[in-house]
Image (cartoon, rainbow, N blue to C red):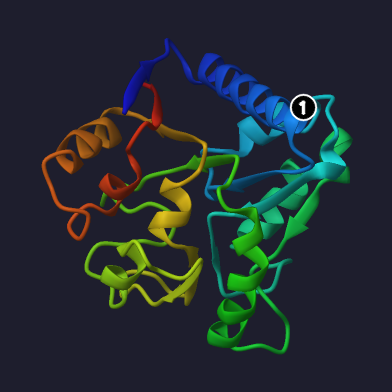
Amino acid sequence: MNFNTYADREILTLAVANEIATTLKTQLQSQEQASIALAGGTTPGPIFDELCAVEMDWSSVSVMASDERWVPQGHERSNAKLIRERLLVQNAAAANFIPFFREGHTPETAAEELCSVVKPYRPLTVALLGMGEDMHTASLFPGTSGLAEALHDAAPEVMVLRPDSQPEVRMSLSAPVLNGALAKHLVIFGEAKKDALERALTLSPQEAPISAVLHETQVHWAP
C-alpha cells in the first residue's frame, strides 16, 4: 500500500483521473482490451467527470461497477446510473458497459451469468475503490453472511450479499477479483476515513474487508 496525500479534493481528482487514464492507455498499447471496475457513491463522481473527456480508444475499454444494489439501472441508488451519467458520456460513451442488474433474473441467477461475463476480463486493468467508515469496500461489509466466501481466493467473480445494514440485496465483485487488478486506487476523504483505514491495517479481512484488497494499492487521501 502506498499512501498519497493531497492538499484538496480537486487536486486528488485530477491526479487519480490522470493515473487511471495512463494505465488504460498503456494497456491498450499492448492488449486488445482494457477493463475497469468502479466504486459507486459520491466520492468517484468528480473523477468520472474528468476521465470521460480523455482521448483514447474507449471502444476497447469495458466498464463495470465494483458492486451494485439490486435495483433497476435507472434507480436513484443504482451505481449503473451514476456511471452512465458521469462516465459514459463524451469520449467515454464508446466504452462497453457491463451492468449487474438483469431484468427478469433473481440476484443468484444474475450472479451466475455474470461470473462467466466477468471472468475473461481478469485480471482487471484498473479497480477504483472506495471505503466506508465501517471499513467495507464494494459490498464486502463486515459481519455479512457470505463474506468469508467472498474473501476466499477461490471465490466466484460475482457474489450476492445481503448486508443487514443495507436496504437492498447487493451484487459485488469478490475480493480476489478486486485485489487482482493490475492497478488499484482507493480514494478516501476526511479524517474519519483516514482513521478507519489505519484501524483496518490492524484487523483481519473479516473485521475490515478493505484490508483484503490493499496489496500494492495506491491510496489517495485529501481532507
Image quarter in which the C terminus is found: top left
Q: Residue at x 76, y 32 (%)?
A: 28
Image quarter in which the N terminus is found: top left
Count of all numbered marks drawn on residues in the image: 1
Q: Secondary structure at mark 1?
A: helix
Q: Position of residue 44 (x, y in %)?
A: 56, 38
Q: Residue at x 88, y 44 (%)?
A: 94
Please say whether residue 93 is visible from this viewpoint. Answer: no
Q: Quadrant of residue 97?
A: bottom right
Identify whether 152 is placed above or below 6.
Answer: below
Q: Residue at x 54, y 14 (%)?
A: 11
Q: Residue at x 73, y 83 (%)?
A: 103
Crowding near the residue tagged with mark 1, few <14, some 14–19, many ≥20 C-alpha atoms within 10 Å: few
Nearer to us in this view, 31 or 82 = 31
Residue closest to the far left:
202
Residue identifier under label 1: 29
Taking the image as shown, residue 187 lies to the left or right of residue 214, namely right
Nearer to us in this view, 23 or 88 = 23
Q: Position of residue 206 (x, y in %)?
A: 20, 60
Taking the image as shown, residue 147 lies to the left or right of residue 75, namely left
Residue closest to the far top:
7
Identify whether 105 is placed above or below 34.
Answer: below
Q: Position of residue 110 (x, y in %)?
A: 62, 81
Q: Position of residue 43 (x, y in %)?
A: 51, 38
Identify whether 54 is placed above or below 114.
Answer: above
Please say whether residue 45 is visible from this viewpoint. Answer: yes
Identify whether 54 is placed above or below 122.
Answer: above
The amino acid type of the residue labelled 1 equals: Gln
